[in-house]
Structures are given as structure tokens and as C-alpha cells.
Amino acid sequence: MTDPIQKLREYGYELPAAKAPVASYVPVTRSGNLIYVSGQISSDTSGVVQGRLGDNMNVVQGGNAAELCAVNILAQVVHMAGVPLQDIKQILKLTVLVASDPEFTEQHLVANGASNLLVGVLGDKGKHARAAFGVVALPLGAAVEIDAVIEV
């Protein structure tokens, strides 16, 4: 398998520093071989990607925001859990929250941004179960938030 960090670069990303929590929680907990990554919002070095799907964002923009969440999940695994990407055995589950207009029904397509990146970077280890929900609002006005359960 190609080095996951190199695959991430092929997507145009460098692994960022792990984001600090914005409230009273820890970003990562570990129990045995399972890592639980708290919700990571759509943000990069420019700040939080804000918006509401079906209002001021389209599916492509939402998918790009979901991609950022996936990159932030990987950063938490490496920097906070201390696990190199190549040691991930399986991404088990993602829960994807999409800030959406009430009429917007394509949350699953927005979530594909994260899913496709994880499979692209980790291969079959990136395949996962998933749920995608539309919500009225997310912390800091984020367009997307995703949490993860990962086996190492």
C-alpha cells in the first residue's frame, strides 16, 4: 500500500495539527484497539467552512467541507492518539452531520466527500459504515461535522 501521508498529499492536503476542543470534551478516547474521535468540523488553516446546504452551499461545496472533516479526523488519530496512519486497521463508522435547509435531502452525497477521501488515502481500510443527518446548525456555523470510530 502506498504511504497514507503521500496519498493525502495527492489529494492536496498536508496532515494538519490536531484541532483543540472548543468545549468541555476530549478530542480522542481509546479503549483497547478502538479509537473514538469526537466530531471534527469543516475547517482548515483559513478557518471554519461555514454554510447551510440547500441554502448558501451546494453538494460539491459540502463534499469539500466533509473532506476537511476527514482530514481533521486523521490528524486527531496521529497527533492525539499517537497512531501512525499506516497502523489503522479499519475505519469502522462515521457519523456525518450536515447543516441543511429543511428541504435539502442529499446529506448522503455530502458525506461522500469524507468517505471517498478515507478510501482514497487508506484503501480498503478506509471503507466504513456511515450515517448522515441534516441538522439545523453546527458549532461555530460549520457546514459539516463528522465523528469516527476507528480500529487500530
Image: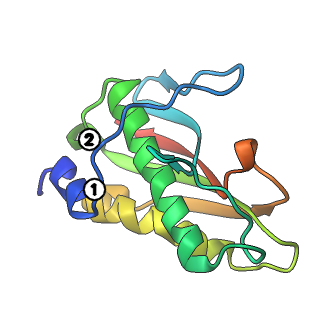
Mark 2 or mark 1, earlier in chain: 2
Does residue 135 lie above or below 34 as drawn? below
The residue nearer to you, when weighing 32 against 119, is 119
The residue nearer to you, when weighing 35 against 133, is 133
Judging from the image, the colouring scheme is: rainbow
Residue 55, percent from left and from top: 78, 75
Please state if 132 lies on the left or on the right of 76 as rendered.
Answer: right
Q: Which residue is drawn at 71% across and 24% down?
A: 23
Total count of labels: 2
Residue sticking out furthest to the left: 2
Q: Is mark 2 on a helix, strand or loop?
A: helix
Marks 2 and 1: CB-CB under 8 Å? yes
- Tell me, for residue 122, which label it has, or none: 1
The residue nearer to you, when weighing 101 against 130, is 101
Does residue 110 lie above or below 131 as drawn? below
Q: Quadrant of the N terminus?
A: bottom left
Please state if 122 lies on the left or on the right of 134 as rendered.
Answer: left
Does residue 10 lie above or below 41 as drawn? below
Q: Mark 2 points at which residue?
A: 85
Residue kind at label 1, given as amino acid type: Leu
| Quadrant in the rendering for residue 130 | bottom right
| Quadrant in the rendering for residue 98 | bottom right
Q: In which quarter of the image is the C terminus?
A: top left
Q: How far apart are the alpha carbons under marks 2 and 1?
A: 8 Å
- Tell me, for residue 113, which label it has, or none: none
